[in-house]
């Protein structure tokens, strides 16, 4: 997520930065007050023994307020709350000394110097806004003036004027220090914030360039593959067409010769019968017909796959037709199971599915790719589950395996062309990309169920389209 660069975002970031900064400063100041209160009490007993008990009450109240402020500061979550608690702590300390000062008899100057140090301390520790700092100082000075009015005889007018000037000067210096520190911290923060925005923008630009480069590389690979396919298409089509054109007549010849041989079998000589048995002619005649049928199916499969790849590379789709997806899924799973070892178990769970407008051959290619990936995932032992059902207006097919699952780092790139998690030489990286493209043309989707806890589960969703709309290009 890119950090916003607006003024409001800068203010929000500054407030978030100030929370911990001001919390640390306020807690430090509060702890100093808690530690110093007993020392101040000892000086009160030494310097003003007659006022010690009265001052002790004020010091204890100051310490109690400071401890409460410490608790509040640790629990506060907003900048405003931190400033309220820190202001309360500073006010309690300042008000205590301001109330004590007019009652001093013999050590007025010494207490005045100590009082001024409170202003310096506050100014050095806090980086409040100037208005808040000035308000705290003015309130403390007002307490000093009020105490003088209540005890006019304890100090001369000259002493009071001098202390007020001294304290006022200290307050002005502390206010200046606080404001300067705040401006410097704000300037440093704005510079770092702008640098962060620039760094993020640069990272985003680099990432965009990397993605563009990857897309260009993938596009060039697809283009090169398309050119290669165009060059090989004629070479592939010719031998496949030769096989297809000759398989039909060859099957007829084989059936005719088999019929003649079966009719002539009873009239064969004993020597010919022995030769017949040695070469298992009965089995050969039956197997020849089955082999020719399998070869015809294989040639048809090659032609279908070849046509599908050409359509994929051209971005076109064959004409759709009304079909039941379950029929193609069953046949694909049956063909897939023939090549599995006994240690891999296939579980099937099918619900009745409605007919829909689709290209059955391409959907079968999707199912077969997913099944092949599942077999590679479970390796030599495991389970593969296939489930088909309806969900609303969609047909849903789930292909699940008990393999190690998909690495989280690889999940975003699963459907990219030429991306593969298989070992070098064992995967082209086109299987899932082809599946994705086919489902896109069908208006459906294919995805990895990332919430599946063990192994991998791929979800294929195909919208149910009325068969009457099927005679269109995919």
Image (cartoon, rainbow, N blue to C red):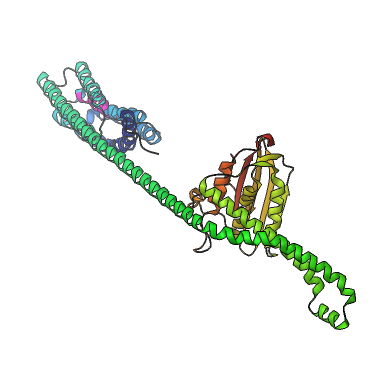
The answer to whether 287 appears left or right of 100 in the picture is: right
Task: Tell me if residue 433 comes above or below residue 118 in the rendering.
Answer: below
Q: Between residues 82 and 302, which one lies in front from this camera angle?
A: 302
Q: Quadrant of residue 203?
A: top left
Residue 388 image position (x, y, % from top left): 69, 46
Q: How many marks?
A: 0
Is residue 95 in the magenta section? Answer: yes
Instruction: Identify the residue at horizontal 64%, vertical 45% (top origin).
Output: 359
Is residue 125 in the magenta section? Answer: no
Q: Is residue 233 visible?
A: yes
Q: Between residues 226 and 242, which one lies in front from this camera angle?
A: 242
The answer to whether 71 appears left or right of 111 in the picture is: right
Q: Which residues are magenta?
A: 93-101
Magenta span: helix, strand or loop, mainly? helix
Task: Tell me if residue 413 comes above or below residue 63 in the rendering.
Answer: below
Residue 452 image position (x, y, % from top left): 60, 48
């Amino acid at each position: 997520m890119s950090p916003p660069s607006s003024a409001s975002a800068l203010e929000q970031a500054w407030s978030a930065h100030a929370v911990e900064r001001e919390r640390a400063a306020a807690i430090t100041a509060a702890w100093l007050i808690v530690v110093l209160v007993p020392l101040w009490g000892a000086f009160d007993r030494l310097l003003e023994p007659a006022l010690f008990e009265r001052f002790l009450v004020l010091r204890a109240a100051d310490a109690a307020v400071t401890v409460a402020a410490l608790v509040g500061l640790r629990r506060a979550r907003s900048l405003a709350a931190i400033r309220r608690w820190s202001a309360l702590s500073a006010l309690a300390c300042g008000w205590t000394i301001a109330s004590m000062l007019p009652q001093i008899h013999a050590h007025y100057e010494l207490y005045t110097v100590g009082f001024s140090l409170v202003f310096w301390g506050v100014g050095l520790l806090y980086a409040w806004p100037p208005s808040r700092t000035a308000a705290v100082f003015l309130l403390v000075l007002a307490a000093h003036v009020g105490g003088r009015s209540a005890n006019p005889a304890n100090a001369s007018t000259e002493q009071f004027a001098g202390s007020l000037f001294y304290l006022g000067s200290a307050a002005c210096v502390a206010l200046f220090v606080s404001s300067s520190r705040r401006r410097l911290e704000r300037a440093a923060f704005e510079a770092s914030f702008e640098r962060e925005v620039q760094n993020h923008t640069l990272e985003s630009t680099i990432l965009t360039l990397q993605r563009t480069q990857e897309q260009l590389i993938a596009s060039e690979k697809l283009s090169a593959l398309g050119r290669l396919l165009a060059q090989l298409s004629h070479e592939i089509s010719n031998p496949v067409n030769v096989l297809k054109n000759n398989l039909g007549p060859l099957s007829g010849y084989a059936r005719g010769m088999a019929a003649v041989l079966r009719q002539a079998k009873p009239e064969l000589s004993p020597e010919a019968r022995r030769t017949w048995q040695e070469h298992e002619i009965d089995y050969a005649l039956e197997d020849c017909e089955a082999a020719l049928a399998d070869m015809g199916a294989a040639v048809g499969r090659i032609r279908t796959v070849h046509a599908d790849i050409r359509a994929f590379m051209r971005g076109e789709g064959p004409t759709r037709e009304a079909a039941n997806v379950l029929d193609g899924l069953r046949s694909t799973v049956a063909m897939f199971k023939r090549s599995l070892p006994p240690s891999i178990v296939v579980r099937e769970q099918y619900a009745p599915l409605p007919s829909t407008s689709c290209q059955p051959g391409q959907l079968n290619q999707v199912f077969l790719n997913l099944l092949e990936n599942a077999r590679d995932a479970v390796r030599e032992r495991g389970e593969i589950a296939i489930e088909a059902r309806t969900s609303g207006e969609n047909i849903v097919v789930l292909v699940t395996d008990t393999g190690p699952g998909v690495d989280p780092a690889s999940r975003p790139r699963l459907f990219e062309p030429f991306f593969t998690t298989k070992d070098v030489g064992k995967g082209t990286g086109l299987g899932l990309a082809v599946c994705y493209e086919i489902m896109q043309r069908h208006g459906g989707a294919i995805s990895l169920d990332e919430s599946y806890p063990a192994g991998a589960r791929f979800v294929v969703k195909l919208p149910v389209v009325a068969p009457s709309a099927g005679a269109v290009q995919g």
